[in-house]
Amino acid sequence: MKCINCVSLTVFLSLLEASHPVLDSISARLHTSQGVIMSLEIHQDQYGNEWIETANFEIVNERQFIFQSSYQVLKVDGQVIYTFNPESKQVVVDQILPDEFSIIDLLRGNFEEITVKKIENNSDSILLEFTINEMNISGSIMIQTESYIPEKLVLYYDENNQINVTINSFNELSANKIYDEFNISEWEVIDLRN
């Protein structure tokens, strides 16, 4: 799993050069005023090694979101990323680079760095195939036709390296947010910002 986060977050952390109605609908669904929480199953197959992990992903608003797995918690507030390691009780604070793009960006509805290649509209789902600009990574997003709720995200780095993210549940946030549970006051802080 640690490899999922290392590889994925470099590529993990807006889908067209120009706006597209399907992408706009996905983004609108992800950015409700109440926020959303998704339960994820992440499956990575990397050069013969496989990792499977479950995680929660909350989108509080366009600037604040959190990814929580059993290995680590990634909390983003604007351009600042907090990486919490529950085992060591340490949090690393860093800056997100303006040109950095990752699978987290896709999950939170930021599609600016992708180009849509093909859209298949089935009776109950839409399959959108894309390429991430500058990285030459292809992928796909499957969403429900009527609600535009994402069901699956796949990234193909190459024939021996891919990530499949299945969205097992999608709900509006309750008053008790995972995001609010993680603050740096009770952790050893390692600040890498300049």
Image (cartoon, grey):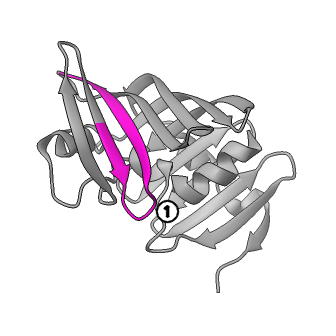
- Magenta range is 129-145
- Front residue of 154 and 176: 154
Q: Name the residue type under label 1.
A: Asp
> How far from the left and from the top, in percent, is residue 40?
53, 29
From this viewpoint, which residue is outermost toward the front? Answer: 159
Q: Is residue 133 above or below residue 34?
A: below
From this viewpoint, which residue is outermost toward the right? Answer: 88
Whether residue 158 is visible to the viewer of this picture, yes or no, is: yes
The residue shown at (40%, 60%) is 63
From this viewpoint, which residue is outermost toward the top? Answer: 123
> How far from the left and from the top, in percent, is residue 128?
27, 35
Q: Secondary structure at mark 1?
A: strand
Label 1 belongs to which residue? 77
Q: Where on the picture, by quarter, is residue 146?
A: top left
The residue shown at (38%, 26%) is 171
The residue shown at (79%, 46%) is 86
Quadrant showing the N terminus? top right
> How far from the left and from the top, in percent, is residue 15?
29, 51
The magenta stretch spans residue 62: no
Q: Where on the picture, by quarter, is residue 123?
A: top left
Quadrant showing the C terminus? bottom right
